[in-house]
Amino acid sequence: MNKETVDVVIAKTKNLIAAPSVYAGLKETAQAWLAAVNTAKEDEATKKYIADLKECITSIDGLIAFTESPHGLQILGKEGAKKMAAHAKEIKAAGAKYCDCPACAAAVAIVEKLQQH
């Protein structure tokens, strides 16, 4: 992996780790990837990181379904779920394929950058 790719992915990974919406397991994988950069374990860690990122990215349809589910209502509250559902439908209409929360946005950017490598 070239230096520019590593630098971009490190920055995006730090954003991912700091995101309040990041899944704890993905945060651990991200931290393990950071620790593996420039070591013999980097390739193996990168493969796991990409797989975990792909698994954790929420599709826009998945986000809409969540905001309209009983579980979504429980977590977000009635008004929060309503606002998030409206936002998700708005960005879907504009062409979004994925949730745009800080964790998903960082994950999508990281996957795209690593797959260019």
Image: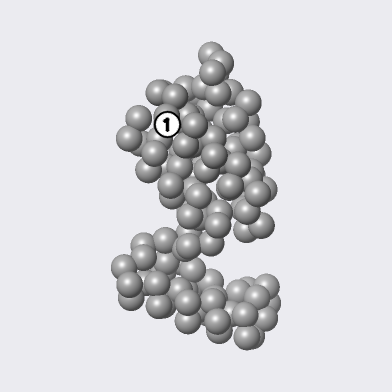
Q: Nearer the viewer, residue 27 or 6?
A: 6
Q: Which quarter of the rendered picture does the N terminus lie within?
A: top left
Q: Position of residue 52 (x, y in %)?
A: 51, 42
- Foreground of the two, 111 or 3: 3
Q: Is residue 6 left or right of residue 112?
A: right
Question: Residue type at mark 1?
Answer: Thr
Q: Residue at x 59, y 38 (%)?
A: 30
Q: Residue at x 58, y 23 (%)?
A: 36
Of helix, strand and loop, which one carries label 1? helix
Q: Residue 29: x percent and y percent? A: 60, 37
Q: Is residue 70 visible?
A: no
Colouring style: one colour
Coordinates of residue 11 in the picture (x, y in percent): 54, 39
Q: Is residue 101 left or right of residue 117?
A: right
Q: Pointer 1: what residue?
A: 5
Q: Quadrant of the C terminus?
A: top left
Instruction: Tell me if residue 49 comes above or below residue 59 in the rendering.
Output: above
Q: Residue at x 40, y 35 (%)?
A: 114
Q: Count the marks: how many?
A: 1
Is residue 8 visible in the rendered image? The answer is yes
The residue positioned 35% from the left and 36% from the top of the image is 115
Q: Residues within 10 Å of mark 1 (few under 14, many from 20)?
A: some
